[in-house]
Image (cartoon, rainbow, N blue to C red):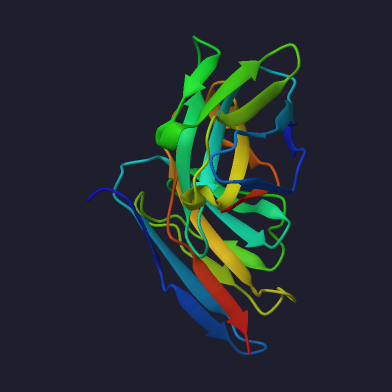
Amino acid sequence: DGGITQSPKYLFRKEGQNVTLSCEQNLNHDAMYWYRQDPGQGLRLIYYSQIVNDFQKGDIAEGYSVSREKKESFPLTVTSAQKNPTAFYLCASKGGYTEAFFGQGTRLTVV
Amino acid sequence: AQSVTQLDSQVPVFEEAPVELRCNYSSSVSVYLFWYVQYPNQGLQLLLKYLSGSTLVKGINGFEAEFNKSQTSFHLRKPSVHISDTAEYFCAVSDRGSGGSNYKLTFGKGTLLTVNP
């Protein structure tokens, strides 16, 4: 089936650790996105990429990093510089003028 | 720059009642508009979209929305809701422009629809 796969579904991070969230799509979409969701805040854009080997910062990029080495993959690293990383993270992809398709999300908790 | 305002953070209704979830947007260029639904601990699912043509757009699960350019609104409606419609609903906008501007998708803060028996 075509779609977007995020893994893991739940992730726990200790203070000072970097963690990487995986996002893979087989929709052949050029654009991919990472959003952070907190209660009452809606979806806030962290990073997006329109093409392989290129990406742009969104509204809340500090403390996060991404790479786009393959069209299908757009992993997000939450670094130790992100002081409040506990949130629900959503990956999406979009092909031109169509709607965005979302993965099922990763819930990250700092322990 | 784009922005989306969802005027109600929570909307409680009784089963079989009609509902309207309000969305206003701001953009300096023409836009595409979307409504998404999110059930707890899941990703977002597209309900409907406005790209061009008729301003009344029909989506899944009996929802519809009307694009009003003069009022910069895209309100979501359903004539009779079910318990299963309880979820969070997000309005989103992207530019019609070519190149990079088309790829940025901006969301509202969401409206939690709670359908009570």
The answer to whether one can see residue A95 in this image is no
B17 relative position to A21: left or right: right
Q: B80 or B108: which is nearer to us?
A: B80
Residue in the picture at 68% in, 52% down: A42
In the current view of this chain or complex, which residue is farthest to the left?
Answer: A1
Residue in the picture at 55% in, 52% down: B86
Which x, y percent locates residue B89? 59, 45
The answer to whether one can see residue A90 in this image is yes
Which x, y percent locates residue B115? 59, 50
Residue in the picture at 22% in, 51% down: A1
Which x, y percent locates residue B50? 52, 22
Which x, y percent locates residue A62? 72, 63
Residue in the picture at 55% in, 36% down: B35
Q: A99 or B55: which is nearer to us?
A: B55
A89 relative position to B13: left or right: left
Q: A107 or B17: which is nearer to us?
A: B17
Residue A8 lies in quadrant: bottom left
The vertical placement of B97 against A104, above or below, is above
The quadrant the C terminus of chain A occupies is: bottom right
A23 relative position to B3: left or right: left
The vertical placement of A29 against B28, above or below, is below
Q: How many marks?
A: 0
